[in-house]
Amino acid sequence: DIQMTQSPSSLSASVGDRVTITCRASQSIYSNLNWYQQKPGKAPKLLIYAASSLQSGVPSRFSGSGSGTDFTLTIRSLQPEDCATYYCQQSYSTPLTFGGGTKVEIK
Amino acid sequence: EVQLVESGGGLIQPGGSLRLSCAASGFTVSSSYMNWVRQAPGKGLEWVSVIYSGGNTYYPDSVKGRFTISRDTSKNTLYLQMNSLRAEDTAMYYCARDSSSYYNFDYWGQGTLVTVSS
């Protein structure tokens, strides 16, 4: 199984800050990496697919990059509504696996 | 509008069985890869199963042999039959659609909670 490791596990930033979350795969997954946002009590929401493609309706301040084993989710200018937990997920092979999550809070 | 509505969760004793349902609207279940993903209380996400548009299924080792994913085309509904339930199966269970067939989930239901406890 492919292991997905996210860092940090939590972070606190100010409104307007640039926030970066990293995700590392235990083997190359090429560009088969997705990012989700989950708010408390809600289902996850797809933000980024195929490492860097923005899902329809997602604000452009979200972006993804990377390939192979190392990936990044960037929030260009953090907004209060971005408080959530973010998960990466590899879509290269089954069993599909998720990272452990990164909780983003507003300072 | 695409909608997924899960039902069937509840409190069940260890070793028991439960069947979850996911009623879909706004698209055809049999035309998409349909998945179940679970989340234990306070924990991360774990993928549980997929049924491909062609009907093949796949499970991770954690549920293989105990869980069965299926669909009813006439009802446009997805199911998850869960047998031999264990305490570690306690979680919120979400159904999720993969419309691209590239294993990314663009629509999710609201979830149904399964609690396995005596």
Image (tube, rainbow, N blue to C red):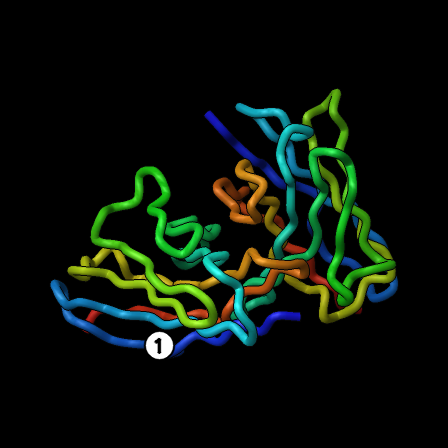
**Figure check: B98 above or below B92:** above
Residue beneath the point at 29% across and 62% down: A83
Q: Is residue B93 left or right of residue A71?
A: right
Find residue B102 and report its horizontal and vertical position in percent: 56, 45
Q: Nearer the viewer, residue B42 or A55?
A: A55
- The image quadrant where one finds the C terminus of chain B is bottom right
Tell me the kind of residue under disc 1. Ser
- For the point 85% across and 56% down, the residue is B83
Horizontal and vertical percent position of residue A59: 24, 46
Q: Is residue B37 above or below residue B55?
A: below
Which image quadrant is residue B40 in?
bottom right
Q: Position of residue B68 (x, y in %)?
A: 81, 48
In the displayed structure, would residue B75 be above or below residue B56? above
Left or right, A102 with respect to B94, comes to left
Q: Residue furthest left?
A: A16
Between B7 and A94, which is closer to the camera in this rendering? A94
Q: Residue at x 74, y 40 (%)?
A: B79
User: To which residue does mark 1 refer?
Assistant: A10
In front here: A98 or A11? A98
Q: Residue under mark 1: which chain is it in?
A: A
Query: Which residue appears farthest toward the top when viewing the image?
Result: B74
Quick check: can you spot residue B97? Answer: no
Tell me the quarter of the picture where residue B37 sits.
Answer: bottom right
